[in-house]
Amino acid sequence: MWITNGMQADWCCLLANTSEGPVHSNKSLIMVPLDAPGVTRQKIEKIGMHSSDTAQLFFDDVRVPQRNLIGQEGAGFMFQMLQFQEERLYGAASSLQSLDNLIDQTIEYTRQRHTFGQPLLNNQVVHFRLAELRTEVEALRALTYRAVESYVAGKDVTKLASMAKLKAGRLSREVADACLQYWGGMGFTADNPISQAYRDSRLISIGGGADEIMLGIICKLEGTLPGKKR
Ligand SMILES: Cc1cc2nc3c(=O)[nH]c(=O)nc-3n(C[C@H](O)[C@H](O)[C@H](O)COP(=O)(O)OP(=O)(O)OC[C@H]3O[C@@H](n4cnc5c(N)ncnc54)[C@H](O)[C@@H]3O)c2cc1C
């Protein structure tokens, strides 16, 4: 379920259980051509991200050659965990310019929109809030750059990548919500960049591991996660 671009993809990288046994070592990554007999797809209707389809894929006795196995059998979970670090860094990095754009567009809109004889932007609550949000974006940029620098240097960035992904999700919601407010009724209409960001950016706190999963990883690495009860 939830496969990004699954309706149009030619191939998928499938994480499948290939044996019995412990959940961390019974999975393998397999390349599956999506025109193989037995594969069907169904589109999922979403509240946002309309330029990228999301699909539910069904596999009914699908067979692929053994050479489609990626790496070693049973190593799929480990590969997937490694891939997540890149996906989470990408999630944080790709949000930066969008956040700056939203703030820029809101400055522009509130500068030309006049209420009570002056530009909306002249209200201190508006320009102060936008300055505060810009500061938060710069802080996210610094965290993301630090995480990417460590990653490029070959270090384990699990904690920094989780922090960056968490912060990107939360800040994207905050910026989209605050900016939409200053667009007033226009912000609540469907066809403008602010309302699109409000819908689309909601995904960042869910996809690629929800905020709470990021918090769990950070706590585990902080040594504050209680052990499992036996
Ligand atoms: C548009 C879209 C595209 C996606 N694309 C892909 C894709 O291409 N490939 C792919 O593999 N997946 C994809 N996903 C799946 C995505 O990664 C999951 O939806 C996400 O990880 C959350 O899992 P879930 O939906 O099963 O939520 P659940 O596990 O049902 O969790 C629901 C909510 O409960 C809370 N929660 C969960 N666990 C905990 C916890 N331990 N402690 C406290 N709270 C918790 C969180 O708030 C979470 O949002 C996509 C999802 C969407 C919506």
Image (spheres, rainbow, N blue to C red):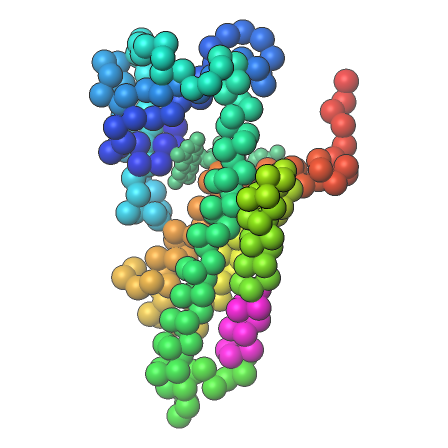
Q: Give the side of residue 40 with respect to residue 143, left or right.
A: left
Q: Give the side of residue 58 with respect to residue 220, left or right.
A: left
Where residue 38 appears, as percent x and y from the top left, is 26, 14
Q: Give the side of residue 91 with respect to residue 2, left or right.
A: right
Q: Quadrant of residue 117?
A: bottom left
Where residue 17 appears, as percent x and y from the top left, is 47, 14
Q: Give the side of residue 24 with respect to residue 108, left or right.
A: right
Residue 69 visible here: yes
Where residue 145 appears, as percent x and y from the top left, is 56, 54
Q: In terms of secondary structure, what is the magenta stretch mainly?
A: helix
Identify the residue shown where x is 50% and y is 28%: 80
Identify the residue shown where x is 39% and y is 53%: 199
75 is higher (above) or lower (below) than 198: above
Q: Quadrant of the N terminus?
A: top left
Residue 166 visible here: no
213 is higher (above) or lower (below) than 101: above
Q: Nearer the viewer, residue 149 or 45?
A: 149
Q: Nearer the viewer, residue 82 or 63?
A: 82
Q: Which residues are magenta?
A: 126-136
Where residue 188 appears, as percent x and y from the top left, is 35, 64
- Number of disc labels: 0
Asked whether 130 falls inside the magenta stretch, the response is: yes
Identify the residue shown where x is 49% and y is 12%: 73
Q: Quadrant of the C terminus?
A: top right
